Image (cartoon, rainbow, N blue to C red):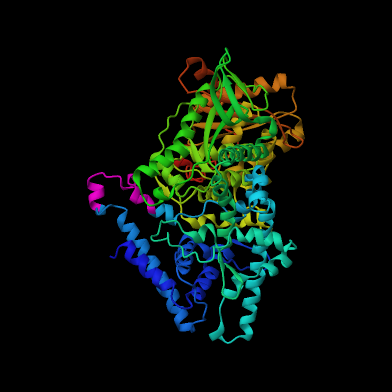
Amino acid sequence: MRNEQEIFDELARLCTSPGCVHAVAYLCFRDNVVRYQGEMTSDDMRHLFSKERLVRTEISTLIGLLVKEDVDFALPTPEVTQKYITRSEELLEEMHHSMMQGMFGGLTLKEVLEKHIDPFDRGAALREPIFYGGESAYSFQYRDLSPRKYAADDEWLESHKGFSIQAARDVIEALGRLHTEKLIAVMDAFRNTHPDQWTLLPGFSFTLEELSQFAGIDASVVEKVLTAFILPEGEKNQEFRSLHDFNAANATPVLRANDQSLILFQQYSIAEALYDSPFYWMRGDPAYRSRAMLNRGRFTEGLAKERLALVFGKDNVYSNVDVYESKGKRVGEIDVLVIFGNRAFILQAKSKRLTLEARRGNDNQIKDDFGKSVQDSYDQGYECAQLLGNSKLRFVAGNGKVVNVPEKFKTIEILCVVSDNYPALSFQARQFLKFQTTEVIQPPFVMDIFTLDVMTEMLDSPLYFLSYVDRRAGYYDKLLASHELVILSYHLKRNLWLKKEYNFILLEDDFLVDLDVAMSVRRDNIPGERTPDGILTRLAKSVLGRILKEIEARPDPGTLDFGFMLLTLSEDGVVEISKAIEKIARKARGDGQNHDLTVPMGKATAGLTVHCNDEPISTAGPRLEGHCRLRKYAQKANDWYGICVKPSDMSLRFGLSLNYKWHPDVEMDAAASHHLRKFGRLGKKVGRNDPCPCGSGLKFKKCCLE
């Protein structure tokens, strides 16, 4: 097998061949464009997850090599164009295989297994997921978050570049719409054009005047914005000598054509450049560098607070929280703190990127970058998590407000958030992050700001968000995907709940397709379904779904625990329990008496008791608690939940949770035995081969009967 450099050099010669630009245009259309009629569906987008598709970094490599010589725009024959396409794909596939071969450092798989070597502890093994890993940010996130990221730097941009960040965003958004119209027009024109003259290059080409008129933006503003992203005249991308070198076509993705028109092959590239490049422009100004760094950090913290407040409410989210001892000594600092009932989030944000040297596979640089961007963030978060609940400490938010911190928490989650795209972040976190846990402090959840943005968009209720974070962090060593959005999309469709016998699961990128459609609908005004069919659509229609909403409106610790338990149930379990509640409510409305039901769950390690009555809480409360204690003991369960609902509309009156380890007790033996003899079993006896009433989907004999 040839080495990477030999393959790269041949690919460079191919890309500078006469007319190869037309082959690149075709590949950009085939592998980046989604065609649909009416509303976009997941089937319309599914081809983007084909194994034959070139990923964006591969196409960017072709574009970067294309400009290493003066581009020859002559249109080749269809046969030559096809030859360019086929050979490009062959070389890129060979490049991938060559990189994969180098992952094991010359060792065979047998040697790796026999010697118990961890190949991923080497930087060379990370080059592949860094280069080929999926995109963790959507292009519209780059585009629309840029004004927020650089709002505080507008004065510098106006004086040094001649445009505001909002103007730049508007120009780039309009360019995306113009490209869509031009590609449609080019495809229509093929009907009246001989196939020998077919080329998709005009669909990616435009002029300043054309864009100005289309966008309704002054031509001088359009020119200043695009000038910042046009590959400079005479620039031959000389630094791009190997796959992981700096590629000028990423920072300046707009190319000049020989007829004075401009070319943009990938809309994603200019959106990403808008998000990244201004920081490097400002960092090049010694007088402004420190201010730019300060604004960058504030952006991440501010956006994180804003997004979390949409889920938990402004009154439950605090930023820049300083922790003081009684004498006023500061002992900790939390970037963003969320307190919801007896649960808390500590979010620590960092603005460190993965360097070029790390992308090349330098072991020390990879670990140094990770340490500064994630490990430091986690260490600070863990120190602060240990301080929560200490009544001797005072927590003061950045606005001067003293935060009322409960003395006891059920769980504390630590979110480590980076402000930029960090390739193979979840892979590196799984490999390198050193962390500790306690009964309260959970494993950390490492993500970028784009993942947090999507999570708060889709999981916009406290219980859904809390439940997902708790589960995702708990499965930190069992799940692997190219990036976090794949796992989130899987959860939205299928509910992230792994059986204990599974010790490792790899999720393919195509699980992402439904989330991609939903986010495009929500953020890019594409017609289609705003919410993937799954946990967000099915539970909401049931009695338990309505009860869940009520729990979120009043986050009492007892009912919060019940809410978390609800989100672990299968769809069938939710439906069956909801029907049972409807049944006892009808009985209670009919005779005015209390009616109840009890359901064991999770192989009988937990259970639920529901009472339905209008009795005074002074009577109904003790009755429910006593019933739950007896059923918990009889079932030998560690956790038991109880709720009381109104007969009229099955709305939640109150709830409780009993969470303590089961142990034998003589008095409870007698009480539980008497209770079961008096009331017997509720409803029809469940047969050994019947579906388990806990909703697991297993037969009763394989689940709670055990």
66 left or right of 644? left
Identify which residue, 140 or 162, lies in the foreground: 162
- Up-down: is 344 above or below 496? above
Inspect the magenta stretch and tell me whether residue 404 lies in it: no
Could you say where residue 394 lies in the image, as x and y percent from the top left? 60, 18
**Is residue 554 something that shows in the picture?**
no
Closer to us: 442 or 630: 442
Specify the farthest residue to the top: 327
x%, y% of residue 482?
A: 46, 51
Q: Whole-percent x and y of residue 405?
A: 61, 22
x 40%, y 66%: residue: 92
Q: Which residues are magenta?
A: 110-127
On screen, residue 146 versus residue 488, left or right, reads right
User: Residue sitting at 58 percent across and 15 percent down?
Assistant: 328
Placement of the C terminus among the 4 image quadrants = top left
User: Is residue 331 shown to the viewer in this render?
Assistant: yes
Q: Return the residue nearer the eye: 29 or 476.
A: 29
Say above or below: 88 vs 672.
below
Q: Quadrant of the N terminus?
A: bottom left
- Above or below, 540 against 671 in this view is below
Helix, strand or loop: magenta stretch: helix
Q: How many marks?
A: 0
Q: Residue furthest front?
A: 287
Q: Position of residue 96 (x, y in %)?
A: 37, 61
Residue 577's quadrant in the figure?
top right
Residue in front for this viewpoint, 660 or 375 = 375
